[in-house]
Image (cartoon, rainbow, N blue to C red):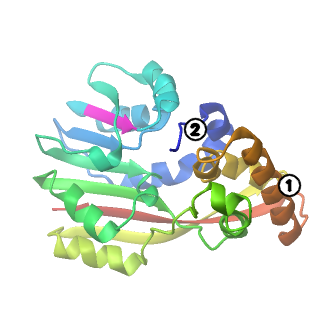
Amino acid sequence: MSSDTWEPVQYEKFLRERSAPFFDLLEMVRKKPGMRVADLGCGTGELTRRLHDALEPRETLGIDSSGKMLEKAAEFAVKGLRFERRAIAAFAPRKPYDLLFSNAALHFLPRHEELLPRLAGYLATDGQIAVHLPANQDHPTHVTARQVAADPPFHGALGGYHHPTNVLPVEVYATLLHRLGFREQRVRMNVYTHLLEGPESLVEWVKGSILNEYRSRLSPELWEAFLASYRERLLACVPDDRPFFFTFKRVLIWGAR
C-alpha cells in the first residue's frame, strides 16, 4: 500500500523552473466568460490560483490525491475557487466543464488512449482541454530510478514496481484529439533548459517528483538505502558540470471543440 509522501517544501524547491510549462499551457487556453474549470492534479494550489485569476471563471475546482499538498492549497482558496481531495482516476463530474486543465499530473496515469476520451466526455460541447505531460523518461534521472528499482532488495519490496512510462508519442495525442472531435488543436514537444548548481541538484529535483512513487512504497530504512544507491549511480553517469545544464522534455496539449 502506497502512502502520501508528497512534500510541498521539497516540490517547491524548483517551483520557478517547474512552472514554466504551466504558463506556456495557460497561454494556449481561450478565455471565455462564465467558465467552469477543473484543474486535475492541482498540487499545492498556487498555480491553480494563477489559473483562476487569469481566466476569471465562474467556478474553478482543483483536485489532488495528496492531503499534504491540499493543506498547502487551502491558503489559495478564494470565492469561486475550491479544492477537493480526489484521485484523477475517480474524477466523474455530473455537470460538464468548459475547461479541463492538468499540469504535470496525467503522466502518472496509464492508458492515455482510454483516459483522454473519458476526460473529453466531461467537457461541454464547446469545451477545451489543456494538458502538460513531463516526458523525460529517457533522461538519466528517470532511467537510473528504474535501474535501482530493479535491484534487490528494492525489486522485491516494491513488488516489481517502477515508475511507468505512460506518455505517448506527440502525434498519437494529435490523432486522439482529432478523433474526439476537437476542431482546433496544438500539440507540441518543448525542451525546457535549466541551469542547476551542480549534478547533486538533480537528486533534489526528482525527490520532489518521481522518487515519491518509490518512497511511498518502501519502509523508511529501505527508502534511505534506495536514495543512497540512486544518488551514487546517477552522479556516476552524468558530467560533473557546475553549473549543470539540465534538459527536460515536456509535451503540451491543447484542444477546442
Q: Is residue 126 magenta?
A: no
Identify the residue at image location x=41%, y=31%. Answer: 49
Q: Are marks 1 and 2 in contact (CB under 8 Å)?
A: no
Residue annotated with mark 2:
6
Nearest to N terminus: mark 1 or mark 2: 2
Mark number for residue 189?
none
Report the amino acid beneath label 2.
Answer: Trp
Q: Is residue 167 above or below residue 242?
A: below
Mark number for residue 198?
1
**How would you rate the neighbour count of disc 2 (Cα within 10 Å): few for under 14, some for 14-19, many for 20 or more?**
many
Identify the residue at image location x=73%, y=64%. Answer: 148
Element on which disc 2 rests? loop
Q: Give the CA distance from mark 1 to mark 2.
A: 24 Å
Res. 25 in view: yes
Q: Is residue 110 above or below residue 88?
A: below
Seen from the viewer's position, the closer of residues 147 and 117 is 147
Q: Position of residue 25 (x, y in %)?
A: 41, 54
Q: Is residue 61 magenta?
A: yes
Q: Position of residue 38 (x, y in %)?
A: 28, 41
| Relative side of 66 to 31, left or right | right
| Relative side of 43 to 149, left or right | left
Range shown magenta? 60-64
